[in-house]
Image: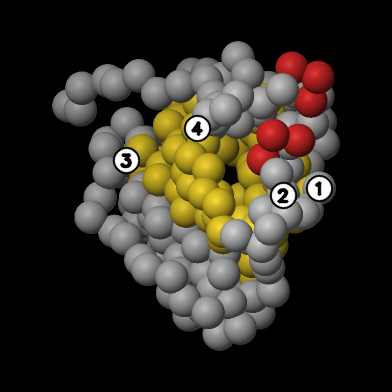
Amino acid sequence: MVAERSFGIHLSVPDKPSKKTFCLIFQAGITGTLNYKDEHNSTLSRQFTVPESGETTLDEDASTCGEKLQRLTFNFVPLMTPTVPETETNYPWRISLEFNKSDDGHSYMLKEYFLTVFFYSNMNSTEQNITIPHYYGQPKKSRVDWTASVNSSYGPTGLSRSRTRLRRPSTIRNYCAADARTSDLVPIIVGACLGGLVIIVLVAYLIGRVRAKRQGYNSV
């Protein structure tokens, strides 16, 4: 038995329209570093943390449960130094993760993901806001880099990747274990080398589909 640990972010994506069951339950702690150019064309770095659940909210309209595609999207005002100006806290950041079902139907892989950043007035950036997409095999150009670490209830794995050029397609894909019949927790290792858009992900755990309270969980 694995000892239970507390993580600040707890988000669930409900099935629609009933909203009585869930296709994804996400529990993690996320920290990251954003690299960008300031008004003098110098590179700046800002460390940020995705706050706990009370301040990190699921975007239900953008989050979906599908037979072949599932999407988790959440909004948050990052915890940074210096802090976000109070007058600008109504401009949150957003992270969206999309997963495709594998050919065998027992596991999911990370298909693409997005980071939407609003540059606050005290960040001295030439940008105002930017959405950073990444599609496997077809990465998009970006003027912003970011790295992130995701810790789950099982702790981090030893997975890490370094920076590559954004122009080069990424061929790194990490699949979660096809363990649908034996486990309630299946790790999906969200690790990919983005060019320009960099993510160093240790591990994120998605706790599988909930059909009904008495039926328990079916692992993704």
Q: Earlier in the sequence, mark 3 or mark 4?
A: 4
Real-space Cα separation, disc 2 to disc 3, in angstroms: 46 Å
Q: Position of residue 145 (x, y in %)?
A: 56, 60
Q: Earlier in the sequence, mark 3 or mark 1?
A: 1
Residue 212 can be seen, yes or no? no
Q: Amino acid at mark 2?
A: Ser
Residue, disc 4: 49
Q: Nearer the viewer, residue 6 or 205?
A: 6
Tag 1 and tag 2, C-beta contact below 8 Å: yes
Q: Nearer the viewer, residue 17 or 188?
A: 188
Closer to the observer: label 2 or label 3?
2
- Above or below, comparing residue 133 to residue 117 in the picture: below
To which quarter of the image does residue 134 belong?
A: bottom right
Label disc, if present, on residue 183 of the rendered structure: 3
Q: Earlier in the sequence, mark 2 or mark 3?
A: 2
At horizontal 60% and vertical 14% (from top left) the residue drawn is 54
Label disc, if present, on residue 128 of the rendered structure: 1
Real-space Cα separation, disc 4 to disc 2, in angstroms: 19 Å
Rate crowding at label 3 as few (under 14), some (14 to 19) or many (20 or more) other CA atoms within 10 Å: some
Tag 1 and tag 4, C-beta contact below 8 Å: no
Real-space Cα separation, disc 1 to disc 2, in angstroms: 7 Å
Closer to the observer: label 1 or label 2?
2
